[in-house]
Amino acid sequence: MRFLNWLAAYGPSYGSGLGWTALIALWASVGAIVWGSVLLLIRLSGRRWVNLAVEGYVQLFRNTPVLLSIYLIYFGFPLIGVVWPAVICGGLALVLQNGAYISEILRGGVKAIDLVQFDAAKSLGLSGWGTFRKVVLPQVLVYALPSLGNQVILLVKDTSLLSAISVAELTMNAKLLTEQTGAAYEAFVVVAVLYLLLVVVLELAARSALRAVRWRPRYDAL
């Protein structure tokens, strides 16, 4: 009964925080996947110095905390005259960090493709872009889909770190409610349940997507 009264009183605050968390996670996930794909295409160009630059970028962001990136962008950009809202700075940090991971996930998917397929595409007269779009990309997405789903879930949970720069997502709303009411237990238990629900929805969506694209043998053609 106590939790029901709590939700009735502060439900709108949680709803606002949940909306911001979902919105940030959505555009940061799309941005990270696009940025990771760009990094993959740069690596596939085959130029040694470019590959070394991308490798350095990936290692930098994979081996430093995302909170550090958030702070550097939020507090560092104004020093060079770039003043963005906190939510943009935090979202950009998530894109840059997770894009590095996603580029490695996609690169693993490329390595899983048999090299014979590239030779076959070349023999059919496909260009480099045509080979990537029609042969490589569909298979990479299938191979990488489970790992991409896991990375998106990690990104959703990392949105809680944006509370450090006062972005009004779920965790920040819980902190504000704690300061207003002094009831830390109720505030953060509700947030934990909401994060759990978000993750469950994402896991179900990833499993459904994987079932939809999984290759199945055509026994009727034998």
Image: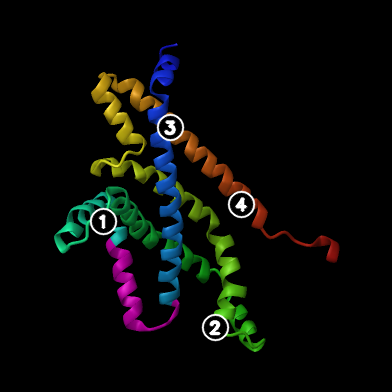
Q: Where is mark 3, residue-wise?
A: 15
Amino acid type assigned to the residue bearing label 3 in the image: Gly
Q: Position of residue 15 (x, y in %)?
A: 43, 32
Amino acid type assigned to the residue bearing label 2 in the image: Gly
Q: Where is mark 1, residue-wise?
A: 64
Name the N-terminal-most of marks 4 and 1.
Answer: 1
**Count of marks, rendered view:** 4
Q: Where is mark 4, residue-wise?
A: 209
Q: Is residue 103 visible?
A: no
Q: Which residues are magenta?
A: 44-60
Q: Is residue 59 magenta?
A: yes
- Are there few (<14), some (14-19), or many (20+) residues within 10 Å of tag 2? few
Q: Is residue 58 left or right of residue 102?
A: left
Q: Is residue 78 magenta?
A: no
Q: Say above or below: 222 vs 127.
A: above
Disc number lying in front (4 or 1)? 4
Quadrant containing the C terminus in the rendered view: bottom right
Element type where label 3 sits in the image: helix
In which quarter of the view is residue 159 placed?
top left
The dot on residue 128 is 2
Q: Say above or below: 193 vs 73.
A: above
Q: Is residue 24 left or right of residue 146?
A: left
